Image: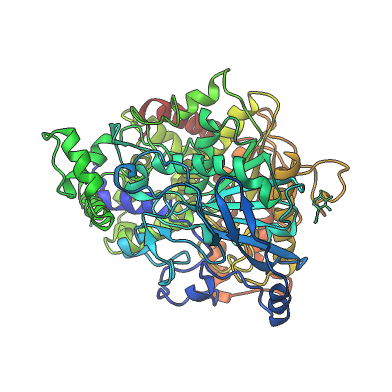
Amino acid sequence: MRTPSSLPLLLLALAALVPAGRGRTLQDPVDVDVDGHSPTQLDATRYEVGDEEAAAAAEAVTAPDVSLPGLGSLSGTVTLSDQKRRPIYSYLGVPFAEPPVGDLRFVAPVPKKPWTGVRDASTPGNICMQVDASSLLGLRARRPRASAAQTQSEDCLVLDVHTPQVNSSAKLPVLVFVHGGSFLTGWAGEKNPQGLLDHDMVLVSPQYRLGPLGFLNLQTEGVPGNAGLLDIVEALRWVRDNIEHFGGDPSRVTLGGHSAGAAVTSLLYLSPLTKDLVQAAMPMSGSALAFWAWDRKPEQAASDITQAALCGGPGQALDARVQCLKKLPAKRLISSYILFILKAMQGGHLIMSGSCPSVQQAGVVVLPDLPENVLSSPDFTARPYLTGITKHEGTFPLEVAEQYYFGPSKLTNNATYLRNDLIHVVLQIIGLDDPASYVADASLQAFMDLSTLGDFAAMRDGVIDLVGAFGFKSPARRIAQLVSDHGQPSSYLYAFNHNGALTQNSPQGVSHGADQPYIFPDGTTWQGADLRVALTLRQLIANFVTYLNPTPADVEGAAVANTPTWAPYARDSERYLELVWPPAGRQWFGGQLTVARRDQFSEGGAAASSTGTSTSTGTSSRNQKADTGGAAASAPSAALAAVVLALTLALRGNGV
Ligand SMILES: *[C@@H]1O[C@H](CO)[C@@H](O)[C@H](O)[C@H]1NC(C)=O
Ligand SMILES: *[C@@H]1O[C@H](CO)[C@@H](O)[C@H](O)[C@H]1NC(C)=O
């Protein structure tokens, strides 16, 4: 009975990790976005403020050259911030490590050697070699793609620095923000500084090796895994040594990130390597405890990729295979990786293995133990941790599966399959060993209406909740708990539930990544509640980065309009901030795990998209329903508590 095909596994796993920018229907052709933005408008190099007057004002200011002792000088560029329209001095494509080529491929990076003369840092650097995840499986583009002008290269270990003041006495707090993209795609320029740089902080956007170049792990010194994580560690060391010259304070560095970048953030927060480099962490929609973030058995995938690259099979000497992999043209390694993925589809394996963080037995070890064990250890030095999720994290993976698998194979019409197999398929994605069907049964109780099993339309909200809970919400909550167990300092948890102009008519709802354009403007002109949410989110982040508290009391310049005190998470009350307009302090975060079904989201979605209703305040009936959803959250049901517990125990022993 349980013979789930591998295809939905793969699609769901990949889709869960393709970072979203905004709501978009999958039926639309690649070049047309339902929001009226073409991909070119989202081009990574686009920093300019919309109007000519502002552009002229920015041109009237010049960025001073910055001299870094022991390294060299940089010349930068100027733009203006979003609201205050004050100068942002940007230094782009700044190398922090030597090119990781030749013998340095796959291993820990080495610091950048000095250069002579003034290095031009006014245009973006090379982007890292990457898989086009959207074309790989015929998925529609959901994120700005690299523009043709951007050169992909192994020589990509660069970062962008954005600062409001080039003044080594300024000592501003620093946010190092790691881009997402499934550990396969993405680049520094995605993180437009115009929003956050209305505040007094320095923003650093580092690049890291992606895919097999960043994460291949043969458990040997030559290919030891986690090179991409070590790239971010090296970037943090560069920040420690140099950020003062850009107006930053090296003792006040917060590491943040989104999606895969959040997993990187969360894993490095646990790593002894960053203990003295990072004072706080801010992972958004990603966690070290997520099933997709940490591979416990990377060798098989690495071996298969090696074989696909014609660098020898398991029977051959490891040393020779490693030498072959080091000499292989990078493009061929990427194409071998793609061959491996396509083959994995037929064999039912997860796509992330071979290209994501993993347990190491050689090289510079990032984590000495499993993430959960590190967190639970009394020796762990907890620091402030702010994390959260979006309301409908589960919609995008589900839509992709519907369009590319369930639909064509007519499985959504197969009541037997839906009743007997669907939950098991989803659980198999997360690598759960559930022989007694304990988690599956509890999941049915917690997420589904048992009277509607077999009717896909009626089951849809439950599946959205299930995928969102397992992939994002439950791992976020679990880390918040474990950090809070260490007492002070605190963890803060949020639920981004605001259904704004970009998402309210999308069947994906407040999807994975829906929060990001509010923080990092992408060309959208926010109005009404959307603008208030954007400004609130940026102020909360600025406060956390500055005071290690998103809502400090009685601090000049830190007041957050219409926002209650954001109380730290605690196990007894499960307090969190619901990011809607106006923001609301809530209890029982566990209630967020079943929010789509409680709201009857899909039903509302159908109504909203057919009428396209939108009032002048930028809200729809669906939005209003969404914004009151959190109020209904209550203590998690016994079944839900059982699922979360089972999931935790299962992942502890049997994670992917
Ligand atoms: C540099 O920063 C210090 C400390 O904030 C300030 O006193 C000084 O005026 C600044 N210098 C310039 C040139 O802005
Ligand atoms: C429905 O799914 C079951 C597996 O649960 C399968 O055995 C059966 O062939 C499917 N029926 C159709 C009509 O595809």
| Colour mode of the rendering | rainbow
Work out which residue is located at the far left of the displayed protein and give it. Answer: 315
Quarter of the figure that contains the N terminus: top left
What percent of the width, then of the height, locates residue 350? 31, 45
What percent of the width, then of the height, locates residue 105? 32, 45
What percent of the width, then of the height, locates residue 523? 61, 71
Quarter of the figure that contains the C terminus: top left
Residue 26 seen anywhere in this rendered image of the structure:
yes
The residue that appears at 46% across and 43% down in the rendered structure is: 231
Work out which residue is located at the far front of the displayed protein and give it. Answer: 116
Front residue of 108 and 288: 108
The residue that appears at 43% across and 72% down in the rendered structure is: 149
Q: Is residue 294 above or below residue 75?
A: above
Horizontal relation, residue 313 to residue 478: left or right: left
The residue that appears at 18% across and 39% down in the rendered structure is: 321
Residue 190 seen anywhere in this rendered image of the structure:
no
Work out which residue is located at the far bottom of the displayed protein and give it. Answer: 52
Horizontal relation, residue 319 to residue 195: left or right: left
Front residue of 366 and 94: 94
The residue that appears at 39% across and 67% down in the rendered structure is: 140
Q: Is residue 561 above or below residue 50?
A: above
Front residue of 191 and 231: 231
Horizontal relation, residue 432 to residue 604: left or right: left
Count all numbered tags in the image, as a single digit: 0
Q: Residue 460's image quarter?
A: bottom left
